[in-house]
Amino acid sequence: MDFPDLSRRSFLGVLGAGAGTLALSACGGGSLGGGSGAGSSGGGAVKVGLVIPQAGVYTPLGVDMQNGWQLWLDQNGGKMGDYTVTTVTADEGEGPDTGVPAIQGLLQNEQVDVVVGIVNSATALGAAAQFAEAKKLLLISNAGAVAITGAARTPYVWRASFTNAQNSAAMGEHLAKEGVGPVYIMAPDYAAGQENVVAFTKAYEGGGGTLAGQALTPFGTTQDYQPFLSGVQESGAKAVFCFYSGGEAVTFVKQYDQFGLKATTPLYGSGFLTEGSVLKGQGASAVGVQTALHYSTEIDNEANTAFVAAYQKAYDALPTCFAMATFDAANVLNRALAEAGDVTGDALSGALDGLGVIDDSPRGPWTFSGQNPKQTVYLREVTMQGSSPINAVVSELGVYDQP
Amino acid sequence: MAGWFDANLVSILNGFAIGSLLFILAVGLSIVFGMMDVLNLAHGALYLVGSYLAVTFAAGEPSWGGFLTALGIAALAGLIAGGALSGMTEPLARRPILDQALLTLGVSLVVAEVLSIIYGNDVFSISPPPGLDGSVAVAGNAYPTYRLALIGVGLVLAVIVFVVVERTSVGALVRASVADRDMVSAMGIDNRKVKVAVLAIGSMLATVAGVLGGPVYGARPGLDDTILILALVVVVIGGLGSVKGALIGALVIGQVESLGRALLPDLASFILFGTLALVLVLRPRGLFGPRKLAGT
């Protein structure tokens, strides 16, 4: 009796991770020679690698990011500054085992000048060294790990999206100020979940709030949250703060309702809990859930109204923060290219640093601070608009820098 | 003690609900393994087919019509898929069992990819049929009615499967085939027919479990892996080829996943495989496994 394969995914994952490590070490030697090609292009053309998930659980995010990117190009005649843009799309997959080699391929085989995109933080962290070596710009439009523009910062990696801690810290301060009573924290037990828990706890306790307890649920293998929800009920919590996204967000919000907690204990979260396609799956169970995020389709400003209308016209769907951040990444890259007149990482990095206030973004005005957006975080509440749920803006929680 | 029981009643009930679902799922896998010595790695994919059929037919306004249609079509699809699987593994019957397992793994990858092409990669939630979509108060806490109903359905199915396998001549044939295939064959019974029937019924139970599990777990890419692993753990704990083993294994894992996680939240990711390891150390052939493994 033997089991040839208990879990094919974890088995393949091990293989993939092995291959990824090999690819990484190979690149350590290879890109020294390949790096000489950098900067040889230009002359009115810029080649951009768009790295997005096209297979696996993050695929819906990849679609949104592609749409955001394409929408900006379509609106601006496919030109950034004086450069005509050629986009090469690469599949990031689910993790660094597929993402890092994809980025390596773009840099070495396709000789792209700039890379935009990346959903997974581990992929972004794993690829950062390649950009430093090649002296090319990486402009991240999702991956939110604090370390990317924090401890592991390099001058060539910039981010146009958010950090995990930004949104959770805003919510922590808000709940402490509101005095909602003891809060119970729930998050999946992996890097992003832990970052959110730490940031929320620090901000919430710093504001004088008290915690009722916390539960870190096994990431990716939790189908049933009942055992943890019964812990919430026993703790006597008056509110729950959580960080879930994707499939887990749908299951969690549904079960939070089914087990009767929604009626007794208000649910708060980082904005990804109710962002994008998951909201449809949650349906009525999500109504009343309040979240903090740097974007909502309902933000009332001219740029957002135009963006939402154009996006709906082009793709017959509401934009998400993932589409918005990639749209914005195109916007700032355009400004930097116009400013620098050069596609090298050093020139673009310098130009991004001097951009000042980005005043025409759908999320409202923001600036780069430490290579990461310093931006307004919004308090949003899920409400029904006709038969479809939306994230209505309740208030602005203030402008937050990365921690 | 009574206080402890009250506080954990919801978790215990939930353990039974999850256990019921796991039993329906795992009993087919267990018997098929006993029959063929081959792990049907496509079992999880068949479950997911059932869940997506529930998405298709029970979408929109929840209705009994839609739910029962989904159940019926899933059962039919399961029977056909089981027959097809049986036909595909037949030419490999004389080859090492790894070849057959790889074939079912390949089938499961193809099925999962096709489902992802048809339904996309979004997460779907499935509403229970009307009347079962509310909650009832259990020891002061709300509990979803549908999960209570699931316990009942699981019990009924357990009784049916048990009676068929243990008390009828068809069941005797299946048990005999699990115990000693060659002897059954020597008595003039075509055990290929038995294999087709068992795979068809086993696969049907997987797709039916997919529909029944829809309102609990929803439908999404990757769910097939998670479900397959749960079913494997149940089968290994219960013992291969045994209905009683699948039932006890499912109930144990149901409680481990529910009550165990509620009592020991810090060990949540460890407790499932911890139980598996413990059982394998103490009873390497599972709680109700055969004394002598077929084929050894």
Image (cartoon, coloured by chain):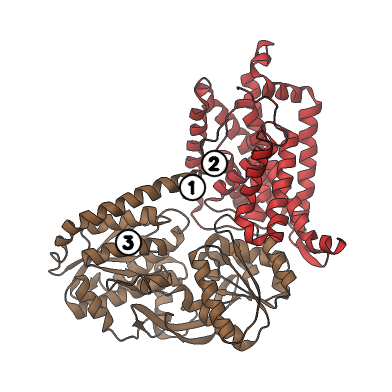
Which quadrant of the structure image shows residue A399?
bottom left
Gap between marks 1 and 3 measured at Cα: 22 Å
Colour of chain B in the image: red
Can you identify the residue that label 1 sits on?
A10
Looking at the rendered structure, the kind of residue marked 1 is Ser
Question: What residue do we see at 57% from left, 64% from top?
Answer: A249
Q: Quadrant of residue B173?
A: top right
Q: Please indicate, yes or no, whether residue B74 appears anywhere in the rendered image.
A: no
The residue singled out by tag 3 in the image is A127
Q: Is residue A289 above or below residue A222?
A: below
Q: Colour of chain A?
A: brown
Q: Are marks 2 and 3 in contact (CB under 8 Å)?
A: no
Label 3 chain ID: A
User: The disc labelled 3 sits on which kind of residue?
Assistant: Ala
Q: Earlier in the sequence, mark 2 or mark 3?
A: 2
- Examine the rendered structure and indicate whether residue A130 appears above or below residue B175: below
